[in-house]
Amino acid sequence: MNRLAIAAAALGVIVLIALGTSVYTVRQTQDALITQFGKPVRVVTVPGLHFKTPFVQSVILFDNRLQMDVFPAEETILGDQKRLIVDGFAEYRIVNPLAYYQTVGPDPDAILQRLDAVVSASMRNVLASVSMVSVLTSSRTHLLGLVLTQVRNAMKQFGVEVVDVRISRTGLPTQNTEAVLKRMRAERERVAAQLRAQGAEAALKITADADRTRTVLLANAEAEATALRGEGQAQAIGIYAKAVDQDPRFFGIWRTLQAYRQGLASGNNRLVLTPESPILRYLREAPDAGAGAGSGGATPAAASAGR
């Protein structure tokens, strides 16, 4: 009885273990490859609970979601013989688990090394025929399309679909960077010197125009002032002549008194004259109010005052 119970219990355990190892679950984000003694038997892509032969068959699960592979930066020689450091990433998914298992193996990450090599070779092949300007402008989209086509065709045999290839960054090697910076600095200095020369030329032109305008304005103003002074002097002479004609004797007396004021008021002037000098006449006696016009006494005094 004890032996039968032990045998039954052992059989039950074996059945439970067999049932446990015969059931497996496939998630929506996975595909399963069933192998029997290492040989692929079938591929399961339907999510849910599935059965396999226990102890004989094995299940290898592959993630069928979109995955990213960041490839390392490396130096590339462009078509214009310039060097450029390029890094980026590729997006891919495993679409054929059987082909993947047969060419790469059961490790889902084993494809990364091969994908990096294919992307690097395609990137070098495409960039080797274009200039740096094409890589750094909107033409990059077309170039990446060519790279994607080559990488996609090369990765089909591994059961992998490459969805996209992108360049994250582009840079110049250290020596190239220094050379480019020197050229940029020289170009900026040349532009600055040209702008300064143009500014100096414009300043000289403005200064010359201003000087010419100033000279013309001063000349016109001087000519106008001379003309006005001439007109004023002519009017003054005319008025003066009319005043003299109205009373010559008064004018003689007034000019003599003006000569006294200008010649004797300061007290520092010395005059060598005889007492009978006509200019001293009004110092000796008052002007004769009853003298007729044109009296000879006033005329010498006026003439002396004019001198």
Image: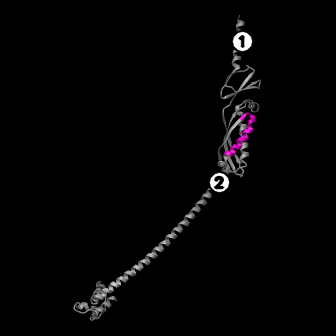
Residue 74 in view: no
- Work out whether mark 1 precedes mark 2 in sequence or the reverse, and give the earlier one: 1
Question: How far is mark 1 from mark 2, CA to CA?
Answer: 80 Å
Q: Position of residue 194 (x, y in %)?
A: 59, 62
Q: Quadrant of the C terminus?
A: bottom left
Q: Is residue 113 left or right of residue 219?
A: right
Q: Is-magenta flag for residue 52?
A: no
Magenta span: 141-160
Q: Which residue is mark 2?
A: 180
Magenta includes 149? Answer: yes
Q: Is residue 213 visible?
A: yes
Q: Is residue 149 left or right of residue 187?
A: right
At x 32%, y 85%, the residue is: 240
Residue bearing the label numbered 1: 11
In the image, residue 144 lies at what x, y percent? 68, 44
Q: Residue at x 71, y 14 (%)?
A: 15
